[in-house]
Amino acid sequence: MSHPLPNRLSLMVLEIDPDYLRLEIIMADGAFGGRVDVYEQPDLPDVLAVLLRGFPVSPADQREVTLGSFDPSHAGGGIRLVFRCTDRAGHAIVDAELEDSPSDGGPVRSVRLAMTVEPSAIDTFVGQLSGWTPAVGERRSLLGTPSDGD
C-alpha cells in the first residue's frame, strides 16, 4: 500500500545571513515529490508575495519565478515555478522543475511535477509571506488541492 506525499509547496528557512537566505524547498503533488536547498535574497518573501498577489486575474494569467540557481557552479539547487490556469473557470496549477546540486559531488538530480491549487490557497500563501521576517526553522506552505484519497 502506498503512502501519499503531502500535496504542497513548502519553504523552510535553514540559514540566515545578511546577504542571503538558505531555504529548503519541498514540493509534492500527493504521489511524487522532490526537495532542494536554494540560496535567495533576504527579501524573497516579499518579492514572492508581490509576484503572486491576486493570481489569477484572468484565464490567461501566468506567473513564473525561479528560486536558487540551475547553474552547477553556484551553491545549492534551483526550482522553477509556473503558476497558470488550466481552463476559463480559473482552475490553477503550479508546474515545477526542481534540480538539486549535491555538495558531495554526487550526480545532479531533477524532478518535474504539477500541483493543482485553489486561488484561495494562493491568497493564503501570499498572506503568510507578506511582511514575514524569516527565522531559522520557520516554514511557509502553499497547500495543493487534495486529490482523491488524500
Image: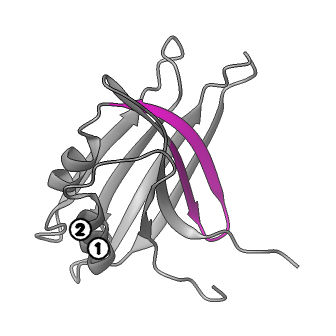
In the picture of the structure, the residue carrying the numbered disc 1 is 124
Point out the residue furthest to the bottom here. Answer: 148
Q: Callout 2: helix, strand or loop?
A: helix
Residue 86: give x, y in percent of width and height: 32, 71
Q: Amino acid at mark 1?
A: Thr
Label 2 packing within 10 angstroms: few (<14), some (14-19), many (20+): few
Classify the position of the C terminus by image quarter: bottom right
Residue 124: give x, y in percent of width and height: 29, 73
Badge number at residue 150: none
Residue 76: give x, y in percent of width and height: 53, 26
Badge number at residue 127: 2
Pointer 1 and pointer 2: residues touching (CB < 8 Å)?
yes
Q: Is residue 78 above or below residue 28?
A: above
Its colouring scheme is: one colour
Q: In the picture provided, is 82 more to the left or to the right than 15? A: left
Magenta-colored span: 24-40
Between residue 85 and residue 134, name the one nearer to us.
134
The dominant secondary structure in magenta is strand
